[in-house]
Amino acid sequence: MSRSKTIDSSVLKMLRKIRLIAFDVDGVLTDGRIYYGAQGECMKVFNSKDGYGIRLARERGYHLAIITARKSAFVEKRAADWGLKHVFQDIQDKRPVFEALCKELNIDYEQTTYMGDDVLDIPVLKLAGFATCPQDAMPVVKKSCHWISKYKGGLGAARELCDLILSARE
């Protein structure tokens, strides 16, 4: 039995419309921790399973984007590894960027999903047709979501979302 048959019909309807999958980074594509070395260098850890889910979604024709409040060379590098064209860093007010991207891609909000974990993400979550978050998102964020991953940020939440979207088309 395909997974799509186990998904609630109203959720399945939302998933089948999706054309744009967008993510926050810290707390979503990473576990939210930032590592500093002795020389002040900063490092983040990305999960390869999340990355593979993102790559699968891109290869199947979905538009993918990153919208993050921090700026990091690691994010730029990882997004390039995944083949992402839409990477927005150092964005404190994410909603205008999300709106402009939807307009550029000619995508209605109901055709989007966004995964965020903290208060800066709520304005975009309120626009997205399918608002999502990792299991360990802030409680106020969870109240704005249609779906909550069973996985924590940076530990499979993005992969679970991508798999869910891809399975809806089966």
Image (spheres, helix red, strand yellow):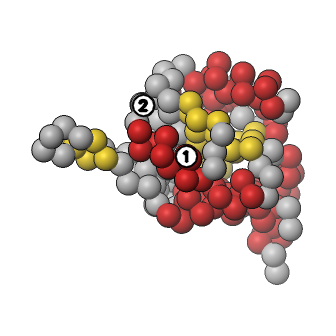
The residue located at (47%, 35%) in the rendering is: 118
Residue 125 figure quarter: top right
- Among all residues in the image, which is located at the extreme bottom? 1
Percent across and percent down for residue 25 are: 49, 42
Percent across and percent down for residue 23 are: 59, 42
The amino acid type, in three-letter code, at marker 2 is Lys
From the viewer's side, name the closer residue of 7 and 121: 121
Q: Which mark is residue 45?
A: none
Q: Earlier in the sequence, mark 2 or mark 1?
A: 2
Residue at mark 2: 71
**Is residue 27 rendered to the left or right of residue 21?**
left
- Among all residues in the image, which is located at the extreme left? 38
The Cα atoms of the two marked residues, 2 and 1, are separated by 13 Å
Residue 167 visible, this angle: yes
Q: Residues within 10 Å of mark 1 (few under 14, many from 20)?
A: many
Percent across and percent down for residue 151 are: 51, 60
**Is residue 27 rendered to the left or right of residue 131?**
left
The amino acid type, in three-letter code, at marker 1 is Ala
Residue at mark 1: 79
The residue located at (79%, 58%) in the rendering is: 60
* Position above or below: 170 against 8: below
**Is residue 42 rendered to the left or right of residue 11?**
left
Percent across and percent down for residue 131 are: 67, 41
From the viewer's side, name the closer residue of 150 and 116: 116
The residue located at (85%, 52%) in the rendering is: 16
- Assign a secondary structure to mark 2: loop
- Assign a secondary structure to mark 1: helix
Q: Residues within 10 Å of mark 2 (few under 14, many from 20)?
A: few
